[in-house]
Amino acid sequence: MSKIDFDAELNAAVRAVREAALVCQSVQSNLVTAATLEKKDRSPVTVADFASQALICSSLLEHSSIHAVVGEEDAAELREAGAEATRDKVIEHVRNIRGAAISPDQALDWIDVGGVTPDGSLERYWTLDPIDGTKGFLRGEQYAIALGLIEGGRVVAGVLGCPNLVGPDGRLGCLLSAAKGQGATVRPLDASGEDGIKPIRVSNITSTSAARFCESVEAAHSDQSQSAQIAAALGISEEPVRVDSQAKYAIVAQGEAQIYLRLPTRTDYREKIWDHAAGLIVVEEAGGRVTDVRGHDLDFGHGRQLENNSGVIATNGPIHDIVLAAVAKFVDVD
Ligand code: AMP
Ligand code: MG
């Protein structure tokens, strides 16, 4: 198999994620209102999620040489009777970008491009979370568009679009990208070409008492009482930074926090590959470390889930082993 042309693939991924992220940003600012919040109406995120996957898959088909996409969504739900209103809105967003001539079937087929379940025979593929942090999206807070490239069970490249994270120019919206051995960068979400790209580095602290840690807003996604015990044991006095989505990896990669704890709340839950691929490579290439709660590398070679891992610990690197030792005291890692 030929080698990956990382420059070409990253360009394709950046282009795809940026386009989808700008659509999500406009849906969030136009459709997420006090009324939808009050009603717990999920329709804005449903529409943006499907439109994002359709746009990214169609962009990868055109600009990437890798056409296998393991996405969070498929179009089955949109093809059902009763889903017409949602389907029409998704198609409207896709047509706004790809042109009025796009047929409904074409838009749904693009979503289904992401329906791949990888087996051992698939050497490389993209993995996509079209909107990671749907709850954050609905609250008008953090979410991310996450696209990672897997080869041989390892993440080799990734792009994170974070529409509500402040970028290097001080404006809302940034895009982080990384490829194996090439470092990680951030740029304004709406910048085109090479405009405004800056290298990023994790924090260089070596003492955990100076660390800030981040975790999920949702208590169901990470055990917040265990993380409080771990933070106390590490001498951390600051409150955790709670944000939705892989924006947590972006925060660690840019040195604004040093630890991301994702502590299992259930023994039977397996993390999804699209929830971690892009974030992991961005943190690693910014100089940090990512493992599971046992200190094992995340193994992306087992289908749609991280079958052999439990939880996630990301740090700036120098403090990783100290954090793992504290985790082992409070979390049942066997
Ligand atoms: P976050 O915004 O970091 O809380 O993560 C959002 C992601 O959590 C979603 O994309 C889900 O795939 C994932 N998720 C759902 N249930 C769980 C769970 N029980 N434990 C960990 N992650 C979960
Ligand atoms: Mg997700």
Image (spheres, rainbow, N blue to C red):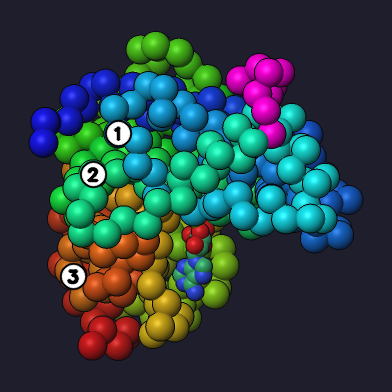
Q: Is residue 37 left or right of residue 96?
A: right
Whether 69 is drawn above or below 314: the answer is: above
Residue type at the position of mark 1: Ile
Q: Quadrant of residue 231?
A: bottom left
Q: Is residue 272 in the magenta section? A: no
**Residue at (65%, 24%) from the top-left corner?**
102
**Which quarter of the image is occupied by the C terminus?**
bottom left
Residue type at the position of mark 2: Arg
Q: Is there CB contact under 8 Å for labels 2 and 1?
A: yes
Q: Which mark is residue 270?
A: none
Q: Which mark is residue 295?
A: 3
Residue type at the position of mark 3: Gly
Q: CA distance from mark 2 to mark 3?
A: 25 Å
Q: CA distance from mark 2 to mark 1?
A: 8 Å
Residue 285: x percent and y percent? 21, 40
Query: Which of pointers 2 and 3 lies earlier in the amino acid sequence?
Result: 2
Give the class, few, some or many, for how many residues have Cα within 10 Å of label 3's Cα (few <14, many ≥20): many
Asked whether residue 258 appears in the rendered view, the answer is no
Q: Which mark is residue 66?
A: 1
Q: Is there CB contact under 8 Å for labels 2 and 3?
A: no
Q: Tell me where the magenta segment starts and ends, as one range.
A: 95-104
